[in-house]
């Protein structure tokens, strides 16, 4: 697995450079930034650490010369989680474990970057959110788009809700990045590495039953929580939707299980997944699936 750099490694180094350069292209960068970790993971998994750095340093130098040194802030941000994922692939760790470790690493890097911007560069992300919302409201008011009842209290409420939702957004972003990177990296690595760890099939997705108890506790506590900015209220405000997302994934797995048992077309559970993702209350299906042995009634032996 770890040998002399070959043509594939050179091509993936080139792909890494193109992805970094694409960050300067509006609209396109929204898509390409989601794939920025993939070449890192493939190179780190298939090369020795020394060869990995020998491939990556020239990429950074070329990117810095073309776009300026500031682009390396983004490029370096994805390096640590990519190396963590690559190291797990080297050890052939279970795929769910790789996903969890990578998600937590990205989460840590995001929090560290926010602290650096706040402490070292004196740039408050929270203040910037407030300034952005107020500027947007001002523009909308000048165009007479907002209702007459809209006042500064409404604006402050929107800002407060957005700020309190930051933890939820950061966790979801970390998870989505890890999922996308693992999916594409595994597809590529599977062609050159034997026994590459794979994720459980969608039909086998199951949350521990204890999660239902935790969800009920959090949901009940959230019903009696006030709308203050205390740690308790903010934590509950973020935990409830995050747990709903988890049970939505469980519900999607449930329909993939039914499709497998009933031999439906593979497109059917994918289509069903769309309303499940769009309407959070449908996560109740996932709660029931985790709480009760519903799947037994759909098994082939029934």
Image: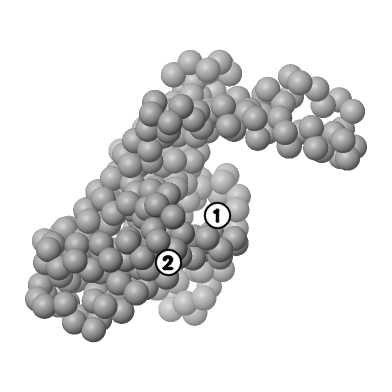
Q: Is residue 263 above or below residue 30?
A: below
Asked whether 184 or 142 is in front, the reply is 142
The CA distance from mark 1 to mark 2 is 29 Å
Could you say which quadrant of the image residue 63 lies in?
bottom left
The quarter of the image holding the N terminus is bottom left
Give the residue number, with chain letter if any, for mark 1.
Answer: 277
Colour convention of the picture: one colour
Residue 267 at what x, y percent from top left? 52, 76
Q: At numbered mark 1, what does the secondary structure look like: helix, strand or loop?
A: helix
- Report if residue 287 is visible in the image: no
Label located before the other in sequence (1 or 2): 2
Could you say which quadrant of the image residue 27 lies in?
bottom right
Crowdedness of circle 2 by 10 Å Cα count: few (<14), some, many (20+)?
many
Residue 79 at what x, y percent from top left? 29, 54
- The structure residue drawn at horizontal position 39% and vertical position 26%, both measured from the top left corner, is 119
- Report if residue 81 is visible in the image: yes
Asked whether 163 or 14 is in front, the reply is 14
- The structure residue drawn at horizontal position 25% and vertical position 62%, both measured from the top left corner, is 57
- The structure residue drawn at horizontal position 80% and vertical position 22%, both measured from the top left corner, is 151
- The structure residue drawn at horizontal position 19% and vertical position 66%, both measured from the top left corner, is 54
Of circles 1 and 2, the one toward us is 2
The quarter of the image holding the C terminus is bottom left
Residue 282 at what x, y percent from top left? 56, 49
Residue 81 at what x, y percent from top left? 28, 51
Q: At numbered mark 2, what does the secondary structure look like: helix, strand or loop?
A: helix
Give the residue number, with chain letter if any, for mark 2.
Answer: 19
């Amino acid at each position: 697995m770890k040998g002399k750099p070959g043509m594939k490694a050179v091509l993936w180094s080139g792909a890494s450079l193109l992805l970094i350069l694409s960050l300067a292209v509006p609209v396109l960068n929204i898509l390409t930034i989601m794939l920025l970790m993939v070449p890192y993971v493939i190179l780190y998994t298939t090369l020795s650490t020394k060869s990995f750095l020998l491939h990556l340093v020239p990429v950074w130098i070329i990117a810095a010369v073309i776009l300026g040194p500031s682009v390396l802030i983004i490029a370096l941000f994805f390096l640590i989680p990519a190396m963590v994922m690559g190291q797990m692939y080297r050890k052939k760790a279970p795929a769910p474990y790789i996903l969890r470790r990578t998600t937590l690493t990205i989460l840590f890097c995001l929090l560290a970057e926010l602290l650096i911007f706040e402490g070292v560069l004196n740039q408050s992300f929270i203040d910037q959110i407030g300034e952005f919302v107020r500027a947007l409201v001002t523009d909308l008011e000048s165009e007479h788009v907002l209702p007459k009842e809209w006042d500064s209290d409404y604006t402050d409420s929107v800002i407060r809700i957005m700020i309190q939702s930051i933890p939820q957004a950061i966790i979801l972003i970390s998870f989505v990045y890890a999922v996308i990177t693992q999916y594409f990296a595994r597809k590529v690595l599977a062609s050159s590495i034997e026994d590459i760890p794979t994720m459980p099939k969608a039909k086998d997705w199951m949350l521990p039953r204890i999660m239902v108890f935790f969800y009920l506790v959090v949901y009940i506590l959230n019903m009696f929580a006030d709308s203050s900015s205390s740690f308790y209220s903010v934590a509950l405000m973020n935990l409830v939707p995050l747990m709903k997302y988890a049970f939505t994934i469980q519900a999607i797995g449930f329909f993939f299980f039914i499709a497998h048992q009933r031999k439906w077309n593979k497109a059917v559970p994918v289509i069903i997944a769309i309303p499940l993702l769009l309407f959070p209350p449908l996560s109740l299906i996932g709660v029931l699936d985790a709480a009760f042995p519903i799947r037994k009634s759909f098994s082939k032996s029934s």
